[in-house]
């Protein structure tokens, strides 16, 4: 049985850990709020870009664009899957579920596609697949994530798509549902699915400057960049949410542990006192003779 | 009256506000948009944008790579980057301009990066201009 001193030490050590997890939870909560604000401030822009695109699409004429239409059905199209994980751990099942989905897709999609490649954003996914299924790694993406950064990445992806290297680009990421729940989502980003034509088509005469195809040429990559940025922001917010929940749990567990060890400590202390008393009493009894 | 809103991916610069006109640096030169304008969709060049906030405070902004949509007297400007004049770091813009100019004069990477440096130079100059812009008297 552990001595009272050992128990005191253990209580102190758990308390220290609890303090760290509590602090991490607080930090994550603050970061989560900021990440959520970023998602919200992207919304008006994303909304307007969408509105403009559907406006162009409804302007009465058929618009074709290499980013819009699905490719001529080749036998075995090539696909690039971008796995979005976090750079840091201690966030529960956040990365594990992405990795699991990636592994599953790797198996199931192998027959449908000619070439299945991975690309990684976030260190955790990259490290897991480094030896199993290596792919391009976009490192330290989440430190100082700006729209410009996402736009650069999306430009590169559009380049890969247009060069014909890939016929489809999918993102696997954690969608931000709420502060405590994320959902693994697989989304096809390229080709861009043409908007539903069901909405009232306004046949208004629109002046396009310089010209409709050129506008579309500039607008669609922007739309794509917005989507990429949104997903990265959601993943980042999800990461902080997951870490917050994990740390909250850890703090609670540490509290439970402290309670248990304290109980044990008190019992040991009591037993010690009782033993000492017994010794003293029996000692005096013996001295009386 | 027109309703103007300007949004970037990072923020909504101005919510829908009523304005009398908007001078837009369009793809084919600057154009003032007035009420009753035909439906228009245009790219926006690197340039200076001047607008008036509610209450009459004038704002000057350097804008690049964006779009403008005019529809039913609603003007929406989508800009990838937009900096208000008071946010611009003039020294940085000046340094960027000097660097771009040096690069353009250097012979080595003449073809490859020509366009890139030209764009950079233009942006830097526009930012400088926006920062030092003097408001015309009303």
Image (spheres, coloured by chain):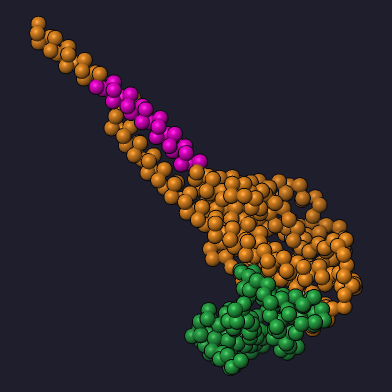
In what quadrant of the picture does the N terminus of chain A appear? top left
Q: Position of residue B66 (x, y in %)?
A: 69, 77
What residue is shown at x 53% (from left), y 79% (from top)?
A: B87
Q: Which chain is orange?
A: A
Quadrant for residue A221, please give it. Answer: bottom right
Chain B, hue in figure:
green
Q: Is residue B63 visible?
A: yes
Q: Nearer the viewer, residue A59 or A1?
A: A59
In terms of depth relative to the viewer, which is nearer, B102 or A184? A184
Q: Residue A285: percent from the left, percent from the top? A: 14, 9
Q: Main secondary structure of the magenta part?
A: helix
Residue beneath the point at 68% across and 80% down: B19
Residue at screen point 39% across, 39% down: A14
User: What span is in magenta?
Assistant: A249-273
Vertical relation: A40 (above or below) A262: below
Up/down of A131 relative to B82, above or below: above
Residue A126 magenta: no
Q: Residue at 40% across / 32% down in the picture? A: A259
Give the residue furthest to the left. A288
Query: x%, y% of residue A99?
Result: 64, 49
Quarter location, residue A211: bottom right
Q: Nearer the viewer, residue A52 or A193?
A: A52
Q: Position of residue A85 (x, y in %)?
A: 60, 54
| Tag count | 0
Q: Can residue A167 be seen?
A: no
Q: Quadrant of the C terminus of chain A?
A: top left
């Amino acid at each position: 049985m552990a001595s009272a001193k050992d128990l005191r030490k253990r209580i102190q050590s758990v308390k220290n850990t609890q303090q760290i997890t509590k602090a991490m939870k607080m930090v994550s909560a603050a970061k989560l709020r900021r990440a959520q604000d970023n998602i919200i401030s992207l919304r008006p822009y994303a909304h307007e870009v969408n509105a403009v695109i559907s406006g162009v699409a409804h302007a009465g004429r058929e618009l074709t664009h290499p980013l819009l239409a699905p490719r001529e059905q080749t036998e075995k199209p090539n696909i690039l899957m971008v796995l979005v994980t976090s750079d840091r751990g201690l966030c529960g099942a956040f990365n594990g579920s992405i990795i699991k989905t990636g592994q599953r897709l790797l198996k199931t999609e192998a027959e449908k596609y000619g070439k299945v490649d991975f690309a990684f954003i976030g260190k955790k996914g990259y490290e897991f697949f480094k030896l199993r299924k290596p792919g391009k790694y976009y490192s330290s993406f989440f430190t100082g994530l700006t729209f410009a950064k996402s736009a650069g990445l999306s430009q590169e992806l559009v380049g890969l798509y247009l060069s014909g290297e890939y016929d489809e680009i999918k993102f696997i990421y954690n969608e931000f549902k709420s502060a405590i729940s994320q959902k693994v989502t697989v989304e096809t980003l390229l080709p861009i699915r043409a908007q539903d034509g069901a909405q009232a088509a306004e046949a208004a005469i629109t002046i396009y400057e310089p010209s409709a195809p050129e506008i579309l040429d500039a607008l669609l990559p922007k739309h794509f960049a917005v989507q990429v940025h949104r997903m990265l922001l959601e993943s980042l917010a999800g990461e902080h949410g997951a870490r917050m929940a994990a740390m909250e749990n850890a703090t609670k567990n540490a509290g439970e542990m402290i309670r248990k060890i304290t109980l044990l400590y008190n019992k040991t202390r009591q037993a010690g006192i009782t033993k000492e008393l017994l010794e003293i009493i029996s000692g005096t009894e013996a001295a009386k003779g | 009256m027109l309703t103007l809103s300007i949004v970037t991916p990072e923020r909504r610069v101005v919510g829908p506000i009523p304005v009398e006109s908007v001078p837009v640096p369009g793809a084919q030169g600057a154009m003032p948009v007035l009420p009753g304008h035909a439906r228009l969709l245009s790219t926006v060049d690197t340039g200076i944008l001047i607008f008036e906030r509610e209450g009459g405070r004038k704002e000057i902004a350097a804008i690049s790579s964006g779009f403008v949509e005019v529809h039913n007297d609603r003007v929406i400007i989508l800009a990838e980057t937009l900096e208000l004049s008071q946010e611009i770091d003039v020294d940085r813009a000046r340094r960027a301009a000097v660097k771009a100019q040096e690069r353009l004069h250097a012979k080595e990477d003449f073809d490859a990066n020509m366009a890139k440096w030209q764009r950079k130079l233009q942006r830097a100059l526009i930012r400088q201009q926006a920062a030092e812009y003097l408001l015309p008297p009303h």
